[in-house]
Image: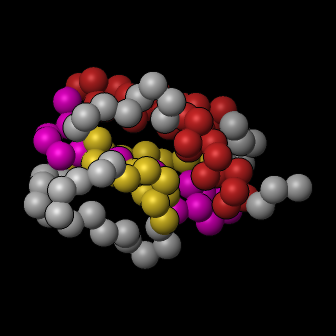
Amino acid sequence: MMSFRVRVLLSVQRAMWDLVTPNLRAVAVAAQEPNIRLRFMFENDPSEDDHENVSLAETYVIADFEDSVSVDATCVWLPVPVSRDLDIGEEWVYMRKESD
């Protein structure tokens, strides 16, 4: 059986299909069973569409797990050149290529 971490990473990657926009800089996840925390980092102030995409991704992840698992996704405005850093317990799920 796959570990909780691997299940979360695969779920989030699938949930993001067709939801990645040019404004999205990175996505980080913290997975500590039974909690999943997602942080979507946007170059510009997240639009209504960005918020809707994050909500859809969150819903897709929720659907992959039992009711006892908690999923929380947030949008963060992180303009360039602010560096993309992980919070404690997070790991990267997605990072776009950016100029040095």
Q: Is residue 2 above or below residue 13?
A: below
Please tell me which residue is depicted at 41% across the width and 29% down the height of the picture. Answer: 19
Q: Position of residue 10 (x, y in %)?
A: 64, 46
Q: Quadrant of the N terminus?
A: bottom right
Q: Horizontal placement of 40 versus 37: left or right?
A: left
Please tell me which residue is depicted at 67% across the width and 60% down the height of the picture. Answer: 5
Q: Is residue 48 above or below residue 27?
A: above
Question: Of residues 73 and 53, which is closer to you in this image?
Answer: 53
Can residue 33 be found in the magenta stretch?
Answer: yes
Residue 41 visible within the image: no
Which residue is most to the front?
100
Quarter of the view holding residue 21: top left
Magenta segment, prevailing SS (helix, strand or loop): strand
Residue 22 visible within the image: yes
Q: Horizontal placement of 68 versus 92: left or right?
A: right
Count all numbered tags in the image, as a single digit.
0
Quarter of the view holding residue 55: top left
Q: Horizontal placement of 85 versus 33: left or right?
A: left
Which residue is most to the right?
1
Please tell me which residue is depicted at 27% across the width and 63% down the height of the picture. Answer: 84
Magenta range is 30-47
Q: Horizontal placement of 83 versus 66: left or right?
A: left
Please tell me which residue is depicted at 30% across the width and 69% down the height of the picture. Answer: 85
Q: Quadrant of the C terminus?
A: bottom left
Can residue 97 be found in the magenta stretch?
Answer: no
Q: Position of residue 95 (x, y in %)?
A: 37, 53
Q: Position of residue 31 (x, y in %)?
A: 59, 61
